[in-house]
Every structure is written in structure tokens, then in C-alpha cells.
């Protein structure tokens, strides 16, 4: 009987997902030889369920830390990490199961399920990251996987065009966020999210610049107006199971990365500015959804509006240091995963039929 130490629990979901991604490709290769590729989706579904087990085991255990590579790089399991992890693997499991039938006519399913598993792995890592280095690395794992998944139906021009637009905007956002992170490190000499506030000297101008860059950089992935223009095209062109993931948890993961960074810099308050952007985002998203005739594009603009509601809660929480703002925002993330994710899966079922 193998008994794992509780100290390994924070790294276990990531390890399961990485190994599961490799095995998914092997399983797909073997099943394609016997004309049963859809079972790769079932295998990936069970990988997601297995990755859910460590999160359930960590419930009620408080904060747990797993050191990576020594120094300041580590994984930190807290309530936020557990929520993000459970939502990510739950969404991934539903997407994998739905894709078994929805994509049964497609080729290259091995690559699809590998990318889906790495997408979930990146989101899980964003939640668990205890330092800015791991936060950015996992953010890029999520981003790169989602680029390829949007363009999965590469025999059509629309997914390629949407993916290229997504790549260009998201890459620009990533560079901007990385520049902001580098300024934070320059000012604090630490990447540890728990220590940044105590290490920051009196350098308000530099930190205002760093905070602005972080908001803009991660705001692209969070589809915050006016950085939202990649989202409708990506939703319309991607397979519906991936549209569900993009809407249900990927754009929220960009917001989580932003908020984790901003919370580490309490001296610089951008909460009201974020709240203003939130009002613009929710208003414009709803207005642009009204004239749409394409179902998936309409749902995409609705997702932009919903991000505005989530942003508003976080913005007020940051400005007034009240937990209810964060609680409301996080609760709506959970609502949105199942509400809008389910809507995209229903749209996919209509398109399939």
C-alpha cells in the first residue's frame, strides 16, 4: 500500500495532470489504430477526476506549502487555490466528456486532449502559485494551450484567424504583465507574494507603473474592456467545449492572476479604477450582445459582461479592504463556470445535431 505524505498534496494535482496529458497522447495513439479515438476523452475525464482527489483531501487542512526548487518558489494551497483548482478540473472533466461525442468526426484528438489537460494544469497552477515566477509560468502554460485549442479545427480559416488575433493580443498582454512583475521585483527584491508588501520601499511612482502594467497585462486575458476584442472571435471559432472553458474558467484565471498580484501590493490602491472599468465592461458587454445573430458570439459578449460583475466585486474589495467584495466575485466565478459553460455546451449540442 502506497501512503503519500500530506506535504505532497499541493503538487499532486499538477503531477497527475502532467502525467495524464502524456498518457492521453499514448492512449489516443493506441485507440486510433483500432478506430476508437473517442475513448481518449473518457480517459481524460477520469484523469480530471483523479486530479480532483487531492483538492478534496486538502479541504479543511488550512494553508499548505510545497517548496519548489528551493528559494522563494513554492506552491501554496489556501481557500482560493482550492476553489480555482476544483472549478478548473470540474470544467475540464465536463469538457472532456462532452468532446467524446462532439469531436468524434475530428482527427488529431490526441493533441486535443493533451492540450486540454495542460490548459487545466495551467489554471490549477495559477491558483496554487505562491510566487510571481510560478504564477507567470503557469499563466503561460494556460495561454499557450488555449491558443492551440482555439485553432483546433485548422482545416477552416476562421479558427486560424481567431487564434492569431488571440495570440497577438494575449502575447502583448503577457509581455506587459511580465514587465510589471519585473518592476515589482526590482522594487521589493522578492517574488514571494506573501513577502512583497513588507519588502517594498517607498517607491510609489515605480509601483504605480508596475500595478498599471499588471492590470493591463492580465486584463487582456480577463477580457476587460477595452482589451476584450479577441474573445468573441475566439469563442465563435473554437470547439464548443473549449468555448465553455474559455468563458467558464480561462478568462477568470486571468483575473485571479491579476488580483493575486494586486493583493500583494496593498499600499497601491487601484480598486476604484478597476470598479470603473468593471462598470464599462458589464455595460458594453451587454449592449454588444443584443444585436448578435450568432449564438456563440452572443454568449461571448455576455461573458464579457459577466466579467464586469466579477471585476466590480474585486475592485470594491481592493479599494475598501472588505472581504465581501472578494467573496461575491469568487461566488460569481463559480456561478459563471456552470451557467455560461453549460450554455456553450448546449450551443455545441445544437451545432452537432
Image: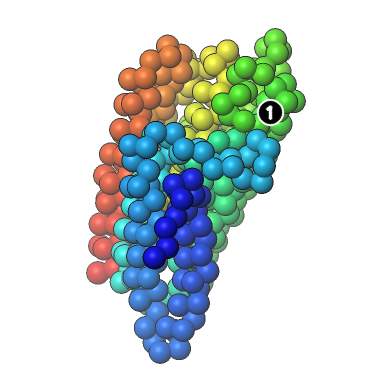
* Lateral position of residue 180 relative to residue 103, left or right: right
Q: Quadrant of the N terminus?
A: bottom left
- Asked whether 281 or 213 is in front, the reply is 213
* Lateral position of residue 250 relative to residue 93, left or right: right
Quadrant of res 237 = bottom left
Asked if residue 233 can be seen in this view, the reply is no
Asked if residue 321 can be seen in this view, the reply is yes
Secondary structure category for the residue under label 1: loop
Q: Residue at left 37%, top 43%?
A: 58
> How many marks can you see?
1
Locate residue 103, reporting x and y percent.
Answer: 37, 71
Query: Vertically, is 287 above or below 108?
Result: above
Q: Quadrant of the C terminus?
A: bottom left
Which residue was labeled with disc 1?
Answer: 190
Locate residue 256, reporting x and y percent.
Answer: 47, 35
Q: Residue at left 67%, top 17%?
A: 200
Query: Vertically, is 107 above or below 160?
Result: below
For the rendered model, the colour scheme is rainbow
Locate residue 178, reporting x and y percent.
Answer: 67, 36
Q: Residue at left 41%, top 24%?
A: 314
Q: Residue at left 42%, top 63%?
A: 2
Query: Vertically, is 31 above or below 292?
Result: below
Tell me the crowding category of disc 1: few under 14, some 14 to 19, or many 20 or more residues within 10 angstroms, Cα based: some
Locate residue 115, reporting x and y percent.
Answer: 50, 62
* Lateral position of residue 149 relative to residue 196, left or right: left
Residue furthest to the front: 1
Query: Vertically, is 293 above or below 253?
Result: below
Amino acid at each position: 500500500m502506497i501512503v503519500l505524505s500530506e506535504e505532497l498534496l499541493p503538487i499532486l494535482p499538477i503531477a497527475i495532470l502532467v502525467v495524464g496529458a502524456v498518457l492521453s497522447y499514448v492512449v489516443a495513439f493506441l485507440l486510433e489504430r483500432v478506430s476508437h479515438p473517442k475513448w481518449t476523452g473518457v480517459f481524460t475525464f477520469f484523469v480530471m477526476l483523479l486530479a480532483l482527489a487531492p483538492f478534496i483531501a486538502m479541504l479543511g487542512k488550512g494553508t499548505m506549502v510545497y517548496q519548489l526548487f528551493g528559494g522563494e518558489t513554492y506552491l501554496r494551497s489556501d481557500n482560493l487555490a482550492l476553489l480555482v483548482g476544483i472549478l478548473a478540473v470540474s470544467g475540464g472533466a465536463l469538457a472532456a466528456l462532452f468532446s467524446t461525442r462532439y469531436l468524434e468526426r475530428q482527427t488529431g484528438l490526441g493533441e486535443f486532449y493533451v492540450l486540454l489537460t495542460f490548459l487545466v494544469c495551467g489554471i490549477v497552477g495559477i491558483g496554487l502559485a505562491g510566487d510571481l515566477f510560478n504564477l507567470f509560468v503557469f499563466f503561460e502554460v494556460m495561454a499557450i494551450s488555449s491558443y492551440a485549442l482555439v485553432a483546433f479545427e485548422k482545416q477552416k480559416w476562421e479558427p486560424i484567424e481567431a487564434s492569431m488575433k488571440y495570440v497577438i493580443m494575449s502575447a502583448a498582454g503577457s509581455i506587459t504583465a511580465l514587465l510589471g512583475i519585473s518592476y515589482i521585483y526590482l522594487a521589493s527584491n522578492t517574488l514571494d507574494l506573501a513577502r512583497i508588501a513588507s519588502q517594498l520601499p517607498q517607491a510609489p511612482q515605480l509601483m504605480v507603473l508596475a500595478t498599471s502594467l499588471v492590470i493591463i497585462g492580465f486584463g487582456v486575458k480577463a477580457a476587460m474592456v477595452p482589451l476584450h476584442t479577441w474573445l468573441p472571435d475566439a469563442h465563435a471559432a473554437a470547439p464548443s467545449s473549449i468555448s465553455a472553458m474559455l468563458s467558464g474558467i480561462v478568462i477568470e484565471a486571468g483575473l485571479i492572476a491579476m488580483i493575486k498580484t494586486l493583493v500583494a501590493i496593498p499600499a497601491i490602491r487601484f480598486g476604484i479604477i478597476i470598479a470603473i472599468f468593471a462598470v464599462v465592461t458589464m455595460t458594453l458587454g451587454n449592449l454588444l450582445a443584443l444585436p448578435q445573430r450568432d449564438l456563440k458570439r452572443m454568449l461571448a459578449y455576455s461573458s464579457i459582461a459577466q466579467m464586469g460583475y466579477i471585476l466590480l466585486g474585486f475592485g470594491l474589495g481592493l479599494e475598501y479592504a472588505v472581504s465581501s467584495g472578494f467573496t461575491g466575485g469568487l461566488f460569481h466565478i463559480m456561478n459563471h463556470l456552470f451557467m455560461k459553460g453549460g450554455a456553450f455546451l448546449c450551443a455545441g449540442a445544437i451545432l452537432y445535431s
